[in-house]
Amino acid sequence: MISGIGSYIIIPKQYNPTIIVPAFNVLVKAPSLSSDETKRLITNELENKIMEIEGIDEVFSVSADNYVGVMVKFKV
């Protein structure tokens, strides 16, 4: 019991580790376009161009009225 308490006190602990996530977001405003139009005109084209970048793991996208959001995740 004493050695357990002693090691708990002595061993360093990091409560909030710094984690760097290799990802970025692309946000595009598309005034006066419906979600179908943003998907067809912007999202599909943007996803295809981003996938050409070396080291890309996954691409997630959201198409809505007047807005497109794309999240890109790199291979770790």
Image (cartoon, rainbow, N blue to C red):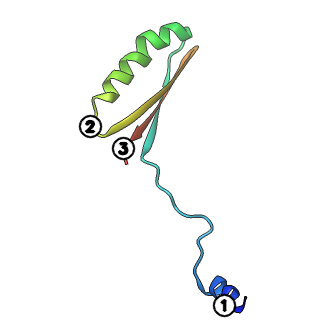
SS class, disc 2: loop
Disc 3 marks a residue whose amino acid type is Lys
Disc 1 marks a residue whose amino acid type is Ser
Can you give x and y, in whole percent of width and height, for residue 73 in the image? Answer: 42, 39
Is 50 located above or below residue 45 in the figure?
A: below
Residue drawn at x 47%, y 13% is 39
Residue 74: quadrant of the picture:
top left
Residue drawn at x 30%, y 40% is 55
Is 16 located above or below residue 6 in the figure?
A: above
SS class, disc 3: loop
Residue tagged 3:
75
Q: Assess whether mark 2 and mark 3 are in contact (beta carbons under 8 angstroms).
A: no
Residue drawn at x 49%, y 7% is 37
Q: Residues within 10 Å of mark 1 (few under 14, many from 20)?
A: few
Is 39 located above or below residue 14 in the figure?
A: above
Residue tagged 2:
54
* Gap in angstroms between the C-alphas marked 1 and 2: 51 Å
